[in-house]
Amino acid sequence: MIRNGSHAVEDEDKRESGSSSHSPEKRKRVIRVWCDGCYDMVHYGHSNQLRQAKAMGDYLVVGVHTDEEIAKHKGPPVFTQAERYKMIRAIKWVDEIVEGAPYVTTLETLDKYNCDFCVHGDDITLTVDGKDTYDEVKRMGRYRECKRTPGVSTTDLVGRMLLLTKSHHSNVDNTAYQLHTDNFGKGPKGHSPWTGVCQFLQTSQKIIQFASGKEPQPGDTIIYVAGAFDLFHIGHVDFLETVHKQAEKPYVIVGLHFDQEVNRYKGKNYPIMNIHERTLSVLACRYVSEVVIGAPYAVGKDLLDHFKVDLVCHGKTEVFLDTDRTDPYAEPKKRGIFRILDSGNNLTTDDIVQRIIENRLQFEARNQKKEAKEMAVIEALKHKDDSLKAKAALAKK
């Protein structure tokens, strides 16, 4: 059980980002922070970047690129710009978004939106001609760096979707999974540390950083929803927003099923994300108050009584019967607290996988091209570093 909350910044987040100097005693004005990106197939790595960025200041502005700009510099996005705008708005650390932000971040952009500096991860983002998109702001000292979240990348997620086994969530050391990720993400000159695949290792500290511990207050309506929430996407966001609107003071609890349970009723290679990854993805959503990790499939008396649930909601998608062929929502239906909601968005995880499959060759080419550019930059940086070391050695002689 992990309690969540919107726009909360923990003291440890401040320490992590080195922003303790931003305490009210030491400054009088609001620090505005800028982040930008494609934010295609938003995952907990993107959310963690925005969490860290918000901790460096007071107000977070996020610029999201258009489909046209992404196609020009990287290749076709999986989600439309309208979908990507809404996904970023749903992340609880974001205060404002800028639609159609320029791909190259300039001082003009920062000044236009009154931002003190921009924040990006410790990888590198390149234009179509291989230039660092943050070169100008770096040179002018208006750039800050946050830690990239290991164990997740769009390349890896696409690879998992194309994988026909359950290796990606049961044992990442599996030979079939490693071979597939090698073939999918590897460029002609080897793996880039930014694009390559590595294992995600969950820690209690990371969960604490994503959660805020907000307790339900008197007068709150406690609403419970359950599911896989796999590849947390715009369909989930629209549903949770609809759930959130069911009460004047909603306290939304999301029950996440374990991987084995999801695979039992979903089949194929689901879930794409394991339980730890899905937990962080849901915790990042502003409409969620609390998460139950490994929630029982049947919403029974004990669960309803323990959380003092006022309302149980489910989307218009199919409700699978429990292992004993019973209705998992029989108890809330008996109590008259069950409600089917129509969010107006029928997008499912299956639909996203289908988008990837239909455009597989394009995504493979996009990622290999991206990694090739990254490897070229790495080689150039290494050569520059070797030259500096050689000059230093000659100077000592």
Image (spheres, rainbow, N blue to C red):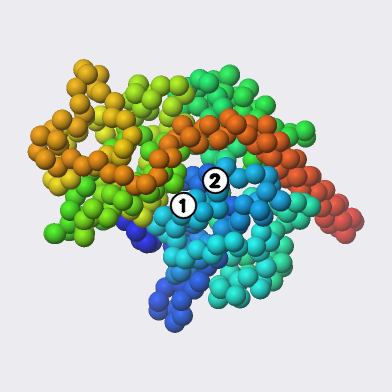
Q: Quadrant of the C terminus?
A: bottom right
Residue count near mark 2 (Cα–Cα under 10 Å), binned few <14, some 14–19, many ≥20? some
Q: Is residue 81 something one can see in this rendering? A: yes
Q: Is residue 289 something one can see in this rendering? A: no
For residue 129, above or below residue 327 = below
Q: Is residue 15 left or right of residue 391?
A: left
Residue at x 49%, y 44% (from the top left corner): 43
For residue 168, above or below residue 87 = above
Residue at x 62%, y 24% (from the top left corner): 180
Helix, strand or loop at label 1? It is helix
Residue count near mark 1 (Cα–Cα under 10 Å), binned few <14, some 14–19, many ≥20? many
Residue at x 22%, y 18% (from the top left corner): 325
- Give the image location of residue 44, x and y in percent: 47, 46
At label 2, which amino acid type do we have?
Phe
Q: Is residue 282 left or right of residue 307?
A: right
Q: Which residue is mark 2?
A: 79
Location of residue 119 (image quadrant): bottom right
Q: Which one is in front, 386 or 167?
A: 167
Q: Is residue 352 left or right of residue 77?
A: left
Residue at x 72%, y 62% (from the top left corner): 135
Q: Which residue is mark 1?
A: 87
Label 2 or label 1, whichever lies nearer to me, is: 2
- Give the image location of residue 244, x and y in percent: 28, 53
Q: Quadrant of the N terminus?
A: top left
